[in-house]
Structures are given as structure tokens and as C-alpha cells.
Image (cartoon, rainbow, N blue to C red):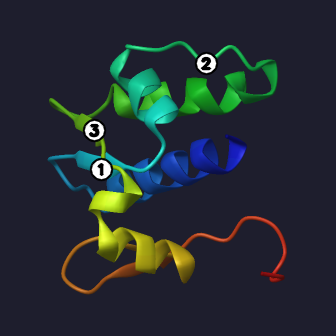
Amino acid sequence: MKAEAVALWGLLWFIKFLDIPQVHIFGGSKCMTDHVKGENNIQQNSLQGWLRRIKGIWNTFHHPSIEHISRAHNKIADELSKKRLLAIEEGIYIMIKIGSDET
């Protein structure tokens, strides 16, 4: 769960840094997407700092949206996640690395 929180925070930070005005995110973690939408409350104490950071950035966007998309229904996201790459827009890729290089 920490990996999902850090990845989401990093993505939001990067979107904010690039001054991208509209945010619509498809996420693979139903728990995290539901939390951001306010439909679920993650209670893990170790994640509270990351969740506050996410909420802080999230609230700066104008009408942001996030929805869960299962990996079974998103072959491209599945392939990219296996390569630790997250496709953003028009061929820009961000490598999100958490942990060691061992697979």
C-alpha cells in the first residue's frame, strides 16, 4: 500500500510541476482510488503522512477525478507496470522505482 501512495503522490506532484490543468487518473489500486474519492478511509498509521500529502495536492486541482481500472481490463497499464514505467501523455514516461532492482 505504501508503494501505491508514494507513486500517486509522485505522479500528482509531477502533474502539478508541469502545470497540467486537468487531472483524470486511472489507478490500479481500488483501495487508494476509493480513498482519494472519499469512499474509503485507509487507517494504516504508517500511511497517514503520505495520504495527507496526496490530499493536499489533490485539493489544488480544479475538478480532479480518479477511477479504478482493473489490470485485467488494461493490458497497456499491465505491460508498463511490469517495466516500472507509467505512461503520462504523448510519449513521456516517468520511471517510478520503489525498492531494489531485483525482480
> Vertically, is 30 above or below 52?
below
* Residue under numbered circle 1: 26
Label 3: state its secondary structure.
Answer: strand
Q: Which residue is pictured at 58% across the width and 23% down the height?
A: 52
The answer to whether residue 84 of the structure is visible from this angle is no
Please tell me the numbered disc located at residue 87.
none
| In contact (CB < 8 Å): disc 1 and disc 3 | yes
Which x, y percent locates residue 86? 42, 71
Question: Image check: 5 left or right of 48?
Answer: left
Please tell me the numbered disc located at residue 67.
3
Residue type pointed to by label 3: Glu
Which x, y percent locates residue 67? 27, 38
Please tell me the numbered disc located at residue 42.
2
Q: Which residue is pictured at 44% across the width and 36% down the height?
A: 30
> Which sits in the foreground, 36 or 50?
36
Residue type pointed to by label 2: Ile
Crowding at dot 3, Cα within 10 Å, few <14 / some 14-19 / many 20+, comes out as: some
The answer to which quarter of the image holds residue 82 is: bottom right
